[in-house]
Amino acid sequence: MTATTTLYRNGTVYSPADPTATALLVRDGAIAWVGPDADAPSADVTADLDGALVTPAFVDAHVHATDTGLALSGLDLSGARSAGEVLAAVAAFAAGLPADAVVLGHGWDETTWDEQAKPDAAALERAAGGRRAYLSQASIHSALCTPSLLVAAQGSPGYDDSGWVRREAHHVVRELALGSVPAAQRGEAQRATLRRAAELGIAAVHECGGPGTSSEADFTGLLALSGQRLPEVYGYWGELLAAAKARDLGAVGAGGDLYADGALGSQTAHLSESYLDADGCGHGYLTAEQVRDHLLDCAAHGMQGGFHAIGDAAIGTVLAGFKEAAGKLGVERLRDARHRVEHAEIINKRLIAGFVEYGIVASMQPAFDRLWGGESQMYAQRLGVTRSLESNPMGAMHGVGVALAFGSDSPVTPLDPWGSVRAAVRHFNPVQRMSVRAAFAAHTRGGWRALPSDIGSARSERSEPRSRDPFGSEGVLSPGAPATFAVWSVAALDKGLPVLAPDSALPVCRRTVLRGETIYEG
């Protein structure tokens, strides 16, 4: 059977190899031709772009799909500016729930409040009408909860009678709260996330799961949705010394949220210097020996590995583990595996050199700087202005050749790819700013390059196995490349990409195409 061809014409095609391109031809899920309208071949179907911009589709390299879906349809506390506003929002939301329901909310950030005292467990229970309640802080590394949930975490590190739980106590409470979500609701939350991603021109996401983050059922359920007229899902299972298990679950890597530390928002990221607004330097979950052994386990099972590491002390521990693993495996074998570190927020030149030496991919979130960086936001409160401005050094890392893959960590920050590109371009520290082209590449091709070189055997049996070279044609618009792209309404272009002025409207997605199939049209 002859494949149907579709010609997209009368637009602007972002193809650095051909800056005159205004059209592209799609055949059998791949791009067959790119060029000016006047030279376009004939096709079975013609789609008029009406002047729109066509670019490679985005990849979000770090998401939590179920949490994101629950936040999209549930109690969003990101706009609350006091403990009283949190309690009022809980009361209004809980009033519409059954008496035995668990109130799930997300996004409060006390660093944006004038008075930063958090509501206590008893007040939260009253606001919830006696229901159990779990309210995750913006970082998702701590939460406020009611006494009926709090009691399960007694004796665990991070427990506090106030109802604000962190560390292992938070993991206990989180598992109970999310375990109350019925499978049907969980599946709909995942679909809502993937639909929203497609609406924003995102064709693939990297789901970061693992103990303390999501259940195995949640993880495998999401992988089963991959590519079903929705964005593709590539899963990372973050459990120590569990590369074989990660593969069995359908993960492409044994990493993602394998915690080397916590988060700055919850004062649990592991720092080399103390927090200014809390006692101590946070908490490290791993030793260098554990990092080494995990990398050796990944090598034994042919799996890409990775770690969640935010603070400089945690990143230092991870790199010490890499050094020990290199003594066993050799540096080149580590480099070939393209292991990942998620977040890498507080990192200096010495640590960046370790990323270069071991070929580590930095999966970073530019929106962290937009929301918390600079001289007057959360980083400055936690760390001081100097360390705040030194955080998230994407420009420096890009400049020395560290492979970058951008994402949102949604729902920590919203799914917002163009907003993330603009955040990298408009970093609070001018020294760390990237060009639009470099930031866009990190959020498109960078996401494909961050995947292991051969993921066919690691994919879920419910999805069609496929080998892919992340150094190949994924994330570019050229003949032979997969026809994975997005179509945008834009106000103005500069060198083929949108002008991303500080207060300008961001591009609006009109269509998202994944391997030739339209997964969103608006």
Image: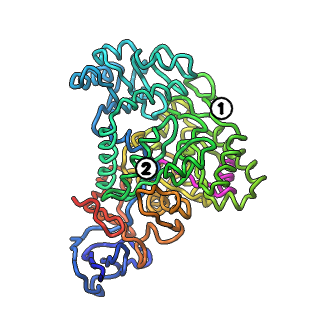
Q: Is residue 321 left or right of residue 233?
A: right
Q: Nearer the viewer, residue 60 or 39?
A: 60
Residue beneath disc 1: 273
Q: Secondary structure at mark 2?
A: helix
Q: Position of residue 224 (x, y in %)?
A: 39, 52
Give me the residue at 42% from left, 23% from top. Answer: 144
Q: Position of residue 267 (x, y in %)?
A: 54, 29
Residue beneath the point at 63% across and 33% down: 284
Q: Whole-Å distance between the Cαs marked 2 and 1?
A: 27 Å
265 relative position to 221: left or right: right
Placement of the N terminus among the 4 image quadrants: bottom left
Magenta span contains residue 233: no
Is residue 356 in the magenta section?
A: yes
Where does the C terminus fall, quadrant-wise? bottom left
Can residue 160 be seen?
Answer: yes
Looking at the image, can residue 431 be seen? no
Pick the front one: 8 or 36: 8
Q: Residues within 10 Å of mark 1 (few under 14, many from 20)?
A: few
- Asked whether, in this view, residue 521 is left or right of residue 62, the answer is left
Q: Position of residue 178 (x, y in %)?
A: 39, 32
In magenta, the rendered stretch is 350-366
Q: Earlier in the sequence, mark 2 or mark 1?
A: 1
Q: Nearer the viewer, residue 8 or 507?
A: 8
Question: Which residue corresponds to mark 2?
Answer: 423
Looking at the image, residue 144 lies above or below residue 201: above
Instruction: Report which quarter residue 6 is drawn in.
Output: bottom left
Q: Secondary structure at mark 1?
A: loop
- Kind of residue sitting beneath label 1: Glu
* Residue 134 screen position, x and y as percent: 38, 25
| Side of 105 where 219 appears, left or right | right
Q: Name which residue lies at 39% across and 69% down.
A: 495
